[in-house]
Amino acid sequence: MRGESRYAYLGPEGTFTEAALRLLPEAAGSVYAPFPTVGSALDAVRTGDCVGAVVPLENSVRGVVPATLDELVSGGVPLRLDAEIEVPVTFALMARPGTELADVRRVLSHPHAHGQCHHWLASRLPGAEVRLSASTAAAAREVAESASPGARYDAAIAAPVAAARYGLSVLASGIGERWDAVTRFVSVRGAGPWPVRTGRDRTSIVVTADGAHSGALVDILAEFSTRGVGLTWIQSWPTGAALGSYHFFLDLDGHIEEAAVGDALMALRRRSVEVCFLGSYPYVGAGRPASGDVLAPDPPGTTPEAWLHSLREGAPAPASRP
């Protein structure tokens, strides 16, 4: 039946998004359909061509994916989130077989990948020209398909799995500046029941605050803090109406079936706050690696008062600790 067994994802084959989709239990046994953009993948869900889609939402190093936020607030037919998948992100420099590192003059990659690998490029390939592509896998595919001596690009930065997918050789691996980088993906569906409460859930909403009210966002957040509902993510996104007018994406710990979460949402409605409920859903996937960065305590004698005084005096000060 139309849309019954197809899952859309941001393609082409070999992207981190495909890796995230393969971790989604609900998609097991489905046909995985790559799409060139986030918008086209989500449109396939809106039209019923695909039963669901997996798209990137946020990277721990480079931040949010604008196309996904834009689609969730202004993409037309409402969509719902039914799962979150976290995938560790590592990058490799890959090229056609026979290419040596010294031969690389032109590199192709996605902006997020380039942003995480630019230090390595600056030190190992300082003279290389870098161009940007729609995805890391698209970069790998273009390098693989342009095998002529006058090829536009010598190498690509992509996920290691893309090298095997497109027949490329890995020249260097682990070239990102953060070994513990993670990208958060979301599974998106059309109308239907919310996933049942699992005890390891997140609730996502979008609220639109009145830019003329200076304390609007504080008032909104207070409804959660007074009920002990933790906020794990806050992201502003312009409404397009005027400067100072924003949508706010909020991720809450917990499920809509939990009393505290439900009470907080009702309180927002009583305030006549515009609320778009995106969904309550479980975490799935590979998860994030344990961080290797341990925050050291403040040096002895560094009180919060001393830290503030240092800031006011313009002197370097250690990072604040709770």
Image (cartoon, rainbow, N blue to C red):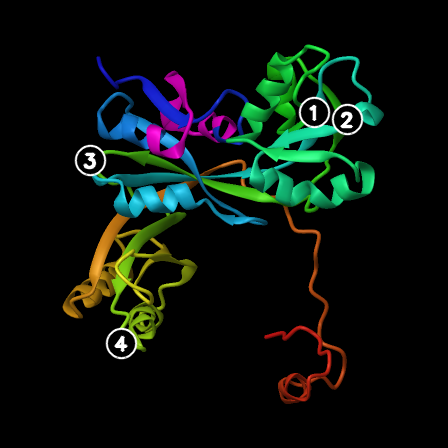
**Residue at the outermost front position:** 150
Cα gap from disc 2 to disc 1, whole angstroms: 6 Å
Asked which quadrant contains residue 303, the reply is bottom right
Q: Secondary structure at mark 4?
A: loop
**Residue position for label 3:** 191
- The crowding category of the residue bearing disc 4, from other C-alpha atoms within 10 Å (few below 14, some 14 to 19, many at least 20), is few
Question: Which mark sits nearer the N-terminus, 4 or 2?
Answer: 2
- The three-letter code of the residue at mark 3 reads Ala
Marks 3 and 4: CB-CB under 8 Å? no
Q: Which residues are magenta?
A: 18-40
- Residue, disc 1: 155
Tell me the CA gap for discs 2 and 3: 48 Å
Callout 2–callout 1 Cβ contact below 8 Å: yes
Image quadrant where residue 146 sits: top right
Q: Report the number of discs.
A: 4
Q: Is residue 140 above or below residue 309?
A: above
The residue labelled by disc 2 is: 104
Q: Quick check: is 301 in the magenta stretch?
A: no
Q: Amino acid at mark 2?
A: Val
* 311 w.r.t. 20: above or below: below
Seen at 23% across and 59% down, the residue is: 262
User: Which disc number belongs to residue 213?
Assistant: 4
